Image (cartoon, coloured by chain):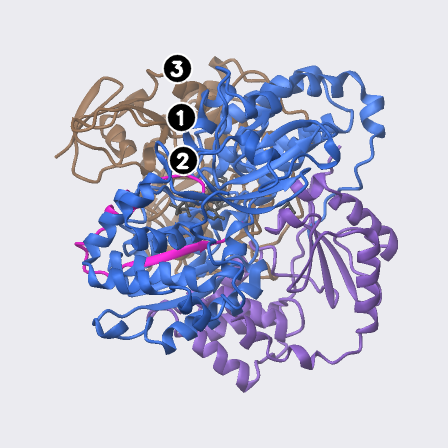
Amino acid sequence: MHGFKIHHVLHKKDNTKVEFSPEILSKVQQIIKRYPEGRHKSALLPILHIAQEELGGWLSPAVMDYVASLLSIQPIEVYEVATFYTQFYTQPVGKYVLEICQTATCAACGGEDIMEHLENKLGIKAGETTTDGLFTLKGVECLGGCGYAPVMQVNTEFHEHLTTEKVDALLEELKNNKNADKAKESKWAEKFF
Amino acid sequence: MGRKILLENIDKEGIERFDVYRKHGGYTALEKALKLTPDEVTEEVKKSGMRGRGGAGFPTGMKWSFLDKKSNNPRYLICNADESEPGTFKDRYLIEKLPHLLVEGLIISSYALGVNTCYIYVRGEFKYLIGILNKAICEANANKFLGKNILNTGYSLDIHVHSGAGAYICGEETAQIESLEGKRGNPRIKPPFPALKGLYDCPTVVNNVETLAAVVPIISMGGEEYAKIGTGRSTGTKLISASGHINRPGVYEIEMNISVEEFLMSDEYCGGMKNGKPLKAVIAGGSSVPILPAHLILKTANGENRMMTYESLADGGFATGTMLGSGGFIAYDEDSCIVRNTWNLTRFYHHESCGQCSPCREGTGWMERVLHRLENGEGRMHDIDLLTNISKNIEGNTICPLGDAAAWPVASAIRHFRDEFEFHVKNPGIVKNIKHGSLKKYTV
Amino acid sequence: MPIVTIDNHTIEVPEGTTILEAARKIGGDIVPPTMCYYSKLKGSGGKCRTCLVKVSQGSAKDPRPMPKLVASCSTPVADGMVVQNITSPEVLEARKAIVEFLLINHPLDCPVCDQAGECDLQNLSYEHGANTERYEEDRREYDKVDIGPNIQLHMNRCILCYRCVYTANQIANSRVHGVLYRGDQAEISTYIQNAIDNEFSGNVIDVCPVGALTDKTFRFKSRVWFLKPMNAHRNCTKCSGKVVVWKFGNEIYRVTARKDQFHEVEEFICNDCRYDHKQPEDWTIEGPAKLSKQSVISQNQYGNLKKPSIILPIEHRTEKQE
Ligand SMILES: Cc1cc2nc3c(=O)[nH]c(=O)nc-3n(C[C@H](O)[C@H](O)[C@H](O)COP(=O)(O)O)c2cc1C
Ligand code: SF4
Ligand code: SF4
Ligand code: FES
Ligand code: FES
């Protein structure tokens, strides 16, 4: 039977100082200006995306408090939002988050087998991260690519018509890439927001 | 060959660029619209009879006429690009290939509604679309079709792209508004409706990507011409996302006058069932609509051909019909397990419930746990009626339609495939040993 | 002004009045039960769905019935509207279902719960619940979260009515707790270790319809029906100072706000009055407090009603108040 215990980590207050670079900060200001005067809270989701990318790969309490201060809102307002949306990670994750669609069409076309294959291959269960910190495995709901099932998203990239061979090749590629500098994505915020 | 209106130019090399789009007649509908009054534009949309393409099928012209134009507050248009309904992937396709078509549609629609700020709410997983849209918006701006004083008409409009972050419920219009305000995606309690009090408590219209893109051909050809395409109250063309056990999955533009059988079997569309296996069931309009067995999706209960139209798919009500919904067409072959599929969808709704109202918050989880047992050979006969009853208790009693969307797949699967549920109860040994990959709790 | 008919009672109410408020004006059995709506908290309501009613005629202008049951607490009346509450079997059936939903993951730990005897969920299930339990799955259990020295949080009992969140926003004007996560994993918590501490924060205890938020300083934990609730007041610079003191003999066990017949506080009180004044000489006693008619204690329901099996048997001794 389904276990039904709910463990949500109660975080410690974290006073680590975090900050965006001046370049990112100006991007953030630009985003805030998209919303009417006094409605800056609207910028919360885009800024959390950027904060997660730029400030350590997940939303630590310190990062969220920083975002709250940028938008002059109460920290709890950020916690409430961050825990609602599945793309925000409130726990550390691997460098590559392998998000495998488990819904409807993907499930009917082998998405669950891909998940099982990855679990075996990486030696972790869905929801866990490899000890080298490289991969986190995550089942997700429909990614809007059902016609190309089974589908997986790795960070912002879509991978479609998955087979076990394709997945293996991708893992190799990502592994070999592991020391590659993040430089190629340094314009991440610019590109997507 | 069906007539293509939205996707007419989709194969033109470089059509995502302004100059190419323009060369193929892009932005002429906008030029035409700006010569009309806003009310005249709305009138054309009304005449077209077009119904919203986001799922509910509400006539767009009528929706626009509800917008409170007396209020002194600014008005907003939100383009719903959250596309998260399982089985649906048309909006993404349209934006990726034809971003300028959407931008043009947004400008025309905003003009008709007297809107000066428009937001496109893109689901967080589609970040790459944000770059594409921003580029198109920039180009339109540079060419004076957008921004201050568009084509010297005195009309100004800004379009901003906003990103979601992983929540199906933010496709529901009031949840989307909350999310756009930087909050949790909790749907609002209605009334008041967005047309009176929406984004920032101002009058707001939320429309689907395809709906807003279709405004372009409506203005180009005129509402009356558009209304001649299709049948009955299903006017125009509709994008169908076809997936599942078919030979040619993909996005197809159909005139709403072809039969389901033609859509499924013709090489122009789905190209028939994969590996020639018999069809078992179809979810015709995205995961939220009732599933139908092969015989009922191909023919109505009266033995008429089932057509790909709002009316024909709904023929027979919930007893023997379904809905066109968002046009997410999923075909299942004879090897598919309906119980497992129902559990899968219920898990989806359970996972996506915002948790505000008790029937949906508690009911979706309850159904999922019962279905999970059934699927794993631990079900009991009375579970089947229990499921029907839980779904009935959720339906109609919730804040937003997600509750209904969670209830219908369960109710319809049991209605049409009861024997399969009973099989699972009677043969625990067999069902336990069927392997479907491993699926467990998997949230991070 | 619109005229509305609810269960055959007709009343004229100001424009914008909700069906629920109109029904409360009529009073009596036809008032729909509420678990999340709170007239003193802006934006509350609409969530629990216990107040569902049937609108069998929309208005004089458009007499069509509404397509489904509506939440009376958040649906405004229209002129000529006809509403059915207890005269509609459909409504009673739906309400039974809602009670069931609220209970499937409820721990049913009434015997050890401080709220027992003054719990809206307990009252609701007595009046509207079914007699049999159909839920055979595991119940949800949350980890314990400590939210400070004054308030005890038992998340397992929470029905996510959001009242405490609105209270912190509107009455206490700063908020460190909220609703986190979503769906049936949603949780009231502070996210980071934190204490809910603010001059008016204690009011979350009074607004909580169940035993999810209780008074940690409630001395010598006692069953409320052993206590004598007395209206009392003191000169307070922060609030009205009008409270109910709950006495056992001469001792004050706890202090709460006064509640009206719908179980809502009349005036919010400050933490000073609530936690720091428990000496008899702190208060001027006015006389016995009137208990809400819905209260299990005041109705002596323990004695009269057949208990739905879904509620665990409660060791009890009834004591008629007043
Ligand atoms: C749970 C839920 C999810 C929805 N998701 C979407 C969606 O992803 N995209 C969309 O366009 N409409 C979605 N809708 C429908 C919208 O609420 C709204 O009706 C639609 O955007 C209106 O646009 P239209 O009139 O152009 O169809 C959803 C509705 C519900 C209840
Ligand atoms: S029906 Fe479900 S998703 Fe909609 S408001 Fe209620 S809990 Fe949230
Ligand atoms: S803790 Fe109490 S007041 Fe707060 S949401 Fe839960 S039940 Fe409501
Ligand atoms: S079901 Fe996997 S992308 Fe839609
Ligand atoms: S009291 Fe109306 S929905 Fe809760």
Q: Is residue B56 magenta?
A: yes
Boundaries of the magenta span: B55-83
Q: Which residue is mark 3?
A: C89
Q: Is residue B36 magenta?
A: no
Q: Secondary structure at mark 3?
A: helix
* Letter of the chain in brown: C
| Residue drawn at x 48%, y 82% as measured from the top left | A26
> In this view of the protein, can residue C183 be seen by the observer?
yes
Image mark 3: chain: C
**Eye-nearest disc, 2 or 3:** 3
Question: Do callouts 1 and 3 point to residues on the same chain?
Answer: yes
Q: Which residue is mark 2?
A: C229
Q: Are marks 1 and 2 in contact (CB under 8 Å)?
A: yes
* Letter of the chain in purple: A
Name the colour assigned to chain B in the rendering. blue
- As measured in the structure, the alpha-carbon distance from the residue carrying label 1 to the one carrying label 3 is 34 Å
